[in-house]
Structure formats: C-alpha cells, structure tokens
Amino acid sequence: MSSNLNRNRPPSSPADGGRSKRRLKTKPLLILLLLLFIGNLLWFVAWLIPNQPGGSEEVASVDGQEITRQQWMAAMEELHGRDTLLQLVNEKVMETAAKEYKIEVSDKEVALELAMLRSAQEGVDKTIFSANEDQLRDTLKTQLILEKVLTKDIVIEDEAVEKFYTENQALYDIKDAYRTKIIVVDSIAEADKAVSELENGTSFEALAKERSIDTATGSLGGDIGYITESQSAVDPNIAKTVASVAVDSWSKPLKLTDGRIAILSVTEKAEGQTFSYDDVKEHISRELALEQLPQSVTPEAFWREFDATWFYGE
C-alpha cells in the first residue's frame, strides 16, 4: 500500500505484541511467499503451453514479425525460472529435513500462521495473497519445518512462554479480516463515474489499474490485502467502512482523511479466531527460540546436508 494510505504508527511496545520483534527471525517466510507467487504464475503458464517440438509455434506477432513459443518460454525462464526452481528445491529439502529429524507440522499450526499472516498490519507483501491457498499453506508448512529444525535444541522455560502470552494476548485474538481492493480518485464526480462503470460490468481490478491515482495499489488491481475494523495502518475511514461492504460488491464513494475519494471492494471475509494459551504455547516457544539465533537462516543452509543440487550449479 502506498504511503498515502498508511498512517504514522508509534514504535512497537509490549502492549502491541512486539510485532516488529517477532518478525525479525521469520523474514525468510516473506521471501518464500513471494517465490510462491512467482511460481504460481509460471506453473499457470506451463499448464497453458503443451509440449511443442522445437517450440517454433507462433504465439504473437508485431508488424509481421513473429514471437515464437520458444522465445516466450526462454524469456519466462530468464525472468523467473531461477526463483521458481529455488522454491521447489527448498520445499523438497525441508520435506527431507522433516523426515530426518522426525518433525511434524499439524494443520492447526498452519491455520494459526495463516490467521496471523492475514492479521499482520505491516511487513507483508500484498501479492502473496494472490497465491492459491493450498499452495500458500504448503509454503507456510515449509517455513514451520525450517523453524522447528532451527530451534529443536533450544530450550525455552514455560515461565517465559506464559509471560509472553500474558503480555501479548491480543496477538492471538484474531479479528474478522476482509480481503479488500481500492480505487482512489480526486473527486466525487470521478468516483461516481467509476461506480457507473462497475455497474455496467467493468472489472474492479481493471478499473483500479486504469483510474486509481494511488499507483502502488492500482498496479495490483487495487489490492490492499486483508483489513480489519480496528486496523491502524490504513486510513480510519477505510477501517470503519470495510465490514459493511458485501463480499463481491463495492462501497459507495468514501471520503478519505486526506480529501481524496475511494471506492472499496471486498472479495473475501476471513472469520476471526481466538487462540488459547494451549493453542499457541508451542508457537510462542518457537518464536522466542528464533530470537536467540544470531541471524536469519534460509533452507539453503541445509542443501549440503541433504545433497541438494540444481541446474544453476551454485
């Protein structure tokens, strides 16, 4: 989301759950999730493209000059192939690590991570939510395996876990969250025109890319991720309005605090959940253990142990 939609936030404190601190050691998760999004794009393209001998089939032309399937796929591989293969290798490496160290990740653990990811107000790239949810869950599982391997020999006392839960209980009371898209314009007249186009069948995403003056969100089809009614990282008028917008519909023109006009669309509602101490004590213990590590670690650190090699040979 662009800085125009964000509000200034005070430094984190024990009362706000120390969210910034708890993200320090889990930075690899964001990298994995971004790779997941890229991977989805490539798998979709690969699904559309049957095997063609030589790849000489024309897929496009410009002024009579053809662009072949082989050229297209070569460009895709150059742009995203390395990152996609890295994701696949890392997932396999962590699956192997889980078997080696007898580590299990439950559906309940993945659900907790997904709920907390949706409730995060900062530090999460909105494009990750464009991924298929099953694949998103698989990526979260891969990250959880990594964290469990890294922390398997670190002992955290129960008292420390209980203290963290008491001081940060609000982190685990997840509110309803609304997957939201936005179109921002300069005037009510422009907003009314946009609403008219929506009513006539224009897609919200296309209109956001074409009309929104907030270029950061417009380039994503207006996507601003998951919003809660109490969220302080967005314009308060957005937070107050989002729950009243029906799923797969849009709001009336809404005046933002900076004077601009917005139209909101809600594409999904994620029901809130409250996690008890028993639900989250292992999660907290693992987070506290991760904070004791000297630096963030990615799955690549385990390639040598599990004899991983790849096309790029590095």
Image (cartoon, helix red, strand yellow):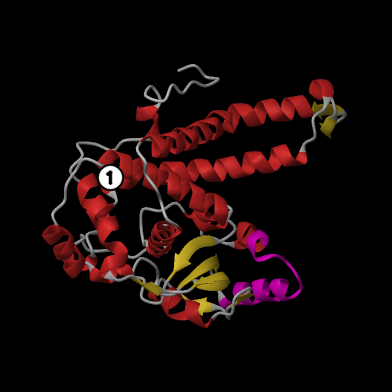
Q: Which residue is painted at 54% across and 28% down in the image?
A: 82
Q: Residue 215, position in %: x, y?
A: 52, 55
Q: Which residue is painted at 38% across and 34% down in the image?
A: 100
Query: Which stretch is magenta?
Result: 188-206
The reply, left or right, for residue 305 in relation to residue 161 is right
User: Can see residue 219?
Assistant: no
Inspect the image, locate mark 1, and give the three-letter code of the amino acid beneath it: Lys
The reply, left or right, for residue 151 in relation to residue 244 is left
Residue 235 vertical position relative to residue 70 in the rendered view, above or below: below
Q: Secondary structure at mark 1?
A: helix
Q: Residue 37, position in %: x, y?
A: 55, 46
Residue 1 image-quadrant placement: bottom left
**Which residue, given by chain and number where applicable, does mark 1 sit on?**
25
Inspect the magenta stretch and tell me whether residue 109 lies in it. no
User: Can see residue 246?
Assistant: yes
Q: Could you tell me which quadrant the C terminus lies in?
A: top left
Residue 272 vertical position relative to residue 218 in the rendered view, above or below: below
Which residue is at the front of the view, 197 or 151? Answer: 151
Inspect the magenta stretch and tell me whether residue 200 lies in it. yes
Q: Which residue is painted at 77% across and 36% down in the image?
A: 49
Q: Which residue is painted at 31% across and 35% down in the image?
A: 297
The image shows a total of numbered marks equal to 1
